[in-house]
Image (cartoon, helix red, strand yellow):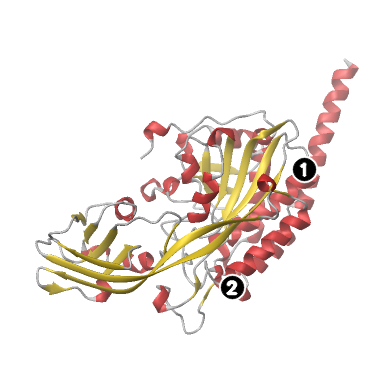
């Protein structure tokens, strides 16, 4: 009986020490310090292929080194480099049924230096009607491997600005062309002429890890993307504000990257992970999720037990403080595990309240999720009303740093039983994925 009581006292003492440790390691001052660096003006908005993204990468690498993370797959450093093909539109001319389309009503995606298509070419005409859900339709056509002329209802014209943010980059570029035209509803005769400048460049994720003590070949991933939109430039499709042209991306996604760095320090210091933990910050999310796709190709999905992708946690969720949502909550039981580990706390994880946005399929978790991994994104972003999303006003002054700190603590605590190997989330049923 004395032995049982003593064990209970030791257990309680251990929990108290862990609670005290987390408050010392994951604190508002530390979170703010990292967030300030990543979202500072001198990072120039962290756009891919700019000095700003290189500076951000170097900072994250220095943090991983300071923490004492191992490199991934015995790499010489934390940089996970990959080659990409980038295409930049230099001209686009479209005529439909004898009428020339103005430049402000169309956009093309192609990796071909020269494009010349007519109704006699192997090209399919499709549409996005006024009653359609624009997001899923856009991504379906954008990802197509066929030549497409997409006729988009004029009511969606405001979407064109966000589409211009999408750079054309791929590790394995296709040979097709997809053109979106806003306004026309039919196209009996048409002509598409376009030119693109094609170049090959390198980008890099930043990846570090803590090897598991008893289950080193089972992995838990914490991730976020460290790129953003850069400096406002009309030719790059980013509006220029005369008073502030830098898109700092404090919430999107310096917040998620900050969380990954802070969690890396926390788990390194408590030093009790039975499963290996990978900490990855992805590049080129804003250009189409290419960093995450490349990273996923280096993983055996059967060895990945869970993925916590952290995206925009700097503002309060629709439920207020001490809350966040999990995309694809119903796809696995991972959300239930996290919530169980938070019983007795004020924090609550909710299912994604924006199912029409298809967020589960759109963020950096998607590639591994499509392979069955319980890979989910944790966010607080109010997708129906986030005033600073993709704007130059997304700065650290708009974030709730205290609440953001509590979210990171909740992620650390709720993931503990998965990292210890006590809990293993169910897999995503890939036969039911869209």
**Image coords of residue 16 (percent x, y):** 81, 39
Helix, strand, or loop for circle 1? helix
Is residue 28 at all visible to an observer of this figure?
no
**Which quadrant is the N terminus positioned in?**
top right
Q: Is residue 364 above or below residue 340?
A: below
Q: Residues within 10 Å of mark 2 (few under 14, many from 20)?
A: some
| Tag of residue 178 | none
Query: Residue pushed farthest top?
Result: 1
Q: Which residue is mark 1?
A: 19
Q: Residue at x 48, y 60 (%)?
A: 84
Helix, strand, or loop for circle 2? helix
Q: Quadrant of residue 57?
A: bottom right
- Report the number of numbered marks: 2
In this picture, residue 371 sits left or right of residue 13: left
Q: Is residue 348 above or below residue 103?
A: above
Q: Residue at x 33, y 62 (%)?
A: 110
Mark 2 and mark 1 residues within 8 Å of each other at the beta carbon: no
Q: Residue at x 30, y 71 (%)?
A: 195
In this picture, residue 1 sits left or right of residue 139: right
**Image coords of residue 152 (percent x, y):** 22, 61
Q: Is residue 176 above or below residue 340?
A: below
Q: Which residue is mark 2?
A: 51
Q: Residue at x 35, y 62 (%)?
A: 111
Give 63 or 95, whichever is nearer the viewer. 95
**Which quadrant is the C terminus positioned in?**
top left
Q: CA distance from mark 2 to mark 1?
A: 40 Å
Q: Residues within 10 Å of mark 1 (few under 14, many from 20)?
A: few
**Image coords of residue 128 (percent x, y):** 23, 56
Q: Quadrant of residue 174?
A: bottom left
Number of the front mark, 2 or 1 = 2
Q: Give the mark, 2 or 1, whose residue is nearer the N terminus.
A: 1
Is residue 296 at all visible to an observer of this figure?
yes
């Amino acid at each position: 009986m004395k032995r049982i009581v003593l064990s209970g006292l030791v257990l309680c003492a251990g929990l108290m020490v862990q609670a005290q440790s987390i408050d010392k390691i994951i604190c508002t001052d530390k979170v703010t310090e990292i967030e300030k660096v990543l979202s500072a003006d001198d990072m120039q908005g962290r756009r891919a292929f700019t000095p700003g993204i290189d500076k951000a990468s170097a900072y994250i690498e220095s943090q991983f080194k300071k923490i004492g993370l191992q490199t991934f797959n015995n790499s010489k450093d934390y940089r996970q480099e990959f080659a990409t093909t980038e295409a930049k539109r230099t001209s686009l001319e479209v005529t439909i049924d004898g009428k020339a389309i103005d430049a402000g009503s169309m956009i093309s995606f192609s990796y071909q230096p020269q494009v010349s298509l007519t109704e006699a070419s192997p090209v399919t005409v499709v549409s996005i009607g006024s009653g359609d859900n624009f997001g899923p339709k856009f991504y379906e056509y954008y990802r197509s491997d066929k030549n497409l002329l997409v006729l988009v209802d004029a009511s969606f014209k405001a979407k064109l600005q966000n589409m211009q943010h999408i750079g054309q980059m791929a590790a394995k570029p296709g040979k097709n062309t997809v053109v979106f035209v806003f306004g026309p509803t039919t196209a009996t005769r048409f002509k598409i002429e376009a030119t693109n400048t094609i170049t090959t460049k390198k980008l890099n994720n930043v990846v570090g890890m803590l090897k598991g003590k008893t289950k080193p070949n089972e992995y838990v991933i914490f991730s976020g993307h460290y790129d953003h939109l850069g400096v406002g430039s009309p030719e790059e499709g980013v509006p220029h504000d005369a008073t502030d042209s830098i898109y700092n991306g404090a919430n999107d996604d310096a917040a998620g990257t900050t969380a990954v760095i802070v969690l890396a320090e926390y788990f390194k210091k408590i030093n009790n992970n039975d499963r290996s933990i990978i900490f990855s910050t992805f590049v080129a999310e804003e250009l189409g999720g290419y960093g995450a796709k490349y990273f996923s190709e280096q993983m055996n999905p059967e060895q990945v037990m869970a993925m916590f992708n952290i995206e925009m946690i700097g503002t309060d969720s629709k439920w207020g403080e001490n809350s966040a949502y999990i995309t694809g909550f119903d796809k696995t039981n991972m959300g239930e595990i996290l919530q169980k580990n938070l019983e007795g706390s004020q924090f609550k994880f909710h299912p994604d309240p924006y199912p029409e946005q298809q967020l589960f399929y759109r963020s950096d978790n998607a590639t591994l999720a499509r392979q069955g991994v319980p890979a989910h994104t944790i966010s607080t972003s109010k997708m129906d009303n986030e005033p600073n999303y993709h704007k130059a006003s997304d700065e650290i002054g708009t974030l709730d740093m205290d609440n953001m700190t509590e979210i990171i603590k909740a992620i650390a605590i709720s993931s503990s039983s998965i990292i210890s190997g006590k809990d293993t989330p169910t897999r995503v049923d890939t036969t039911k994925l869209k």
